[in-house]
Amino acid sequence: MHSVSWSWEENKLLSADEAKRLLERFLQSKDEQQDSQLIERLLYDFAMPIVNAVLRRKFGVDVLHLKRLEQREVEPRECPECKTLLESDLPVCPLCGSKLQPQTSRHFYRSSSELDAEDLFNDVLVALIERFRQWKERPQSAPIDYLPNYIVRLTLNIIALHWRQQSPHYHQLRNRLLYLLEGRGSVKMFALWEGNAPGEQLCGFFEWLGKPRCQSERYWIWCSDPHRFVAEALPYGTDPQKMDMAELLAHVFNWVGGPMEFDDLLAGLQELLGIQSIVIHSANPDGIEWGEEVEGLSEVKEGSLTLRERCCSRCDCGRG
């Protein structure tokens, strides 16, 4: 019987180069027990911290900290399919891919956000383990040179699926924003780019591309009370729900004065447009990429060259 064990406390995190070498060893290995050990090392010492960083940014939950609190209660269990003795709390067997019953502590209270984040965390691990099995069969498909980016993208795609399933209106708003920010229509004045932290997506005017997140006072006002933006930046009596989305974005960016995190922009617009908040639950991540299946694009008007001029002429805020 094979035995696989791991601790949350004792591991040394892998660098990107070390993870690349381990992945190459895994793809070349002919030993099942070694395969299982390499997968666990890649998961615990490389992938999990990346996934956790994305979830902390999106939900404010440190899943790895919660796991450490429960570490002492993890009991050895046998995989029902391959009979491997597992002393870790992975949601699936790393050797055969069979799903395992979760070991959930009853001694720790979990908020709904924490429960959602833990479910997402496990969903990503299940997806990653399945990817490892697929890469083993087709080594040429393995993302050897960009594994960190692959893990971040997979996590974001799983989160996107949760949002899509829970709230069609939220999903529609998000996709409309991505359509504009990525310049996939006639409006080419905006941009979307990756920030320095895992999962951080920044956005703003195209000439801001690559700059860090804005730290202006108005940025934090937007995050706490976006209705202040309406009162200060829009002509009196203007209803943001009736505005062209591209023009509304131009007003927001002009008022804030610098790049915004995409999630902060989305949350503020969600409140202004009266779209209900959502709870997250996931499925297979392979069916969606960011910005796919965009709906409601008929409201995105042409005239990108005049949008900013129109916006700036109607408010007295500088971009800084």
Image: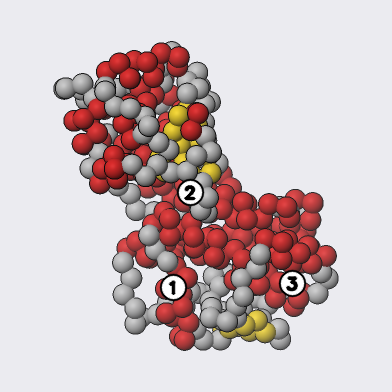
- Residue 269 lies, with reference to residue 237, above or below; the image says below
The numbered mark, 2 or 3, whose residue comes first in the sequence reads 3
The residue closer to the viewer here, 286 or 5, is: 5
Amino acid at dot 2: Glu
- Identify the disc placed on residue 65: 1
Residue at left offset 73%, top offset 52%: 145
Quadrant of the snapshot with the C terminus: top left
Task: Provide residue 19's location: percent of width, then percent of height.
Answer: 69, 64
Rounded to the nearest angstrom, the CA distance separating label 2 from label 3 is 32 Å
Residue at left offset 16%, top offset 22%: 237
- Identify the disc placed on residue 200: 2
Hey, which quadrant is residue 205 in on the image?
Answer: top left
The residue closer to the viewer here, 207 or 11, is: 207
- Residue 224 lies, with reference to residue 69, above or below; the image says above
- Identify the disc placed on residue 162: none
On the picture, is 276 further left or further right than 103?
Answer: left
- Identify the disc placed on residue 35: 3
Rounded to the nearest angstrom, the CA distance separating label 1 from label 3 is 27 Å
On the picture, is 265 further left or further right than 241?
Answer: right
